[in-house]
Image (cartoon, grey):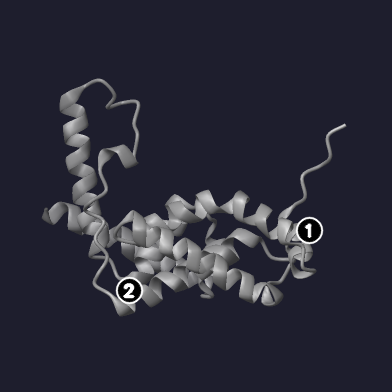
């Protein structure tokens, strides 16, 4: 008989009690999604890996402050976003232009070189437009479209009101549209 997989709440409670295996399970469960979010926030994969590591370190240290009644991943994504913000303040602006078409597989473009080249150009232009977004706009774009969080979960992750999430997302989309049209 197969035992039921513990949910995030049970794993957090176990981690708080000193069960390192429970925390390891959380890391295994969420690192892939967390990396995808970090990758959209940072200029390259090495920086994204640093953000993921920093987020897990901060999560471990702050586990006692996590409300177990709230969803775990939005809390974790908020930590990663804050770590990314800290890096943005210390470093250069984010550059997404190195993202190639391999980051965004498409069945439509498969096998047709012209479509693959055109799609690659669009993705590169989008990367340039995303790089020009304000940090809070990049964060909501990454959390909404990469992590697929709801507006409420984004609000929790970023510790902002849900209306601010809507505003940042709306303004980010407008800025992206203008940026693509300018190019």
Q: Nearer the viewer, residue 59 or 19?
A: 19
Q: Nearer the viewer, residue 19 or 30?
A: 19
Instruction: Indicate the quadrant where residue 175 lies.
Output: bottom left
Whether residue 19 sits left or right of residue 150 in the image: it is right
Rendering coords of residue 133 (x, y %):
27, 66
**Residue in view at x 67 percent, y 72 percent:** 63
Asked whether the viewer can see residue 152, the reply is no
Image position, residue 75 (x, y; %): 59, 66
Helix, strand or loop at mark 1: helix
Left-right relation of 72 to 101: right
Considering every residue shown, the one lying at the far right of the view is 1
Crowding at dot 1, Cα within 10 Å, few <14 / some 14-19 / many 20+, comes out as few
Q: Which residue is mark 1?
A: 10
Task: Name the quadrant of the N terminus.
Answer: top right
> Furthest-top residue in view?
111
Whole-number angstrom distance, CA of label 2 to CA of label 1: 34 Å
The x, y position of residue 144, in whole percent, is 46, 55
Q: Which residue is mark 2?
A: 88
Q: Would you call the spot at circle 2 few (<14 residues within 10 Å), some (14-19), or many (20 or more)? A: some
Is 183 or 146 nearer to us in this picture?
Answer: 146
Seen from the viewer's position, the closer of residues 153 and 72 is: 72
Whether 129 is drawn above or below 110: the answer is below
Residue 86 occupies which quadrant of the picture?
Answer: bottom left
Identify the secondary structure beneath mark 2: helix
Q: Residue at x 83, y 34 (%)?
A: 2
Quick check: can you spot residue 107?
Answer: yes
**Position of 147 relative to 90 (above/below):** above
Q: Residue 181 got which mark? A: none
Q: Position of residue 180 (x, y in %)?
A: 18, 52
Q: Residue 117's quadrant in the figure?
A: top left
N-term mark: 2 or 1: 1
The residue located at (75%, 69%) in the rendering is 16
């Amino acid at each position: 008989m197969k035992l039921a997989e513990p949910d995030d709440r049970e794993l957090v409670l176990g981690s708080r009690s000193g069960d390192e295996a429970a925390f390891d399970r959380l890391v295994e469960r969420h690192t892939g999604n967390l990396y995808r979010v970090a990758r959209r926030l940072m200029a390259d994969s090495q920086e994204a890996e640093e953000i993921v590591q920093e987020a897990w370190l901060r999560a471990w240290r702050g586990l006692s402050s996590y409300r177990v009644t709230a969803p775990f991943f939005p809390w974790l994504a908020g930590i990663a976003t804050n770590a990314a913000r800290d890096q943005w303040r210390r470093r250069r602006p984010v550059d997404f232009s190195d993202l190639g078409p391999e980051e965004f597989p498409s069945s439509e473009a498969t096998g047709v070189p012209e479509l693959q080249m055109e799609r690659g150009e669009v993705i590169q232009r989008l990367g340039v437009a995303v790089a020009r977004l304000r940090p809070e706009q990049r964060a909501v774009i990454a959390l909404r479209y990469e992590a697929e969080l709801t507006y409420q979960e984004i609000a929790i992750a970023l510790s902002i009101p849900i209306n601010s999430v809507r505003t940042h997302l709306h303004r980010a989309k407008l800025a992206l549209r203008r940026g693509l049209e300018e190019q």
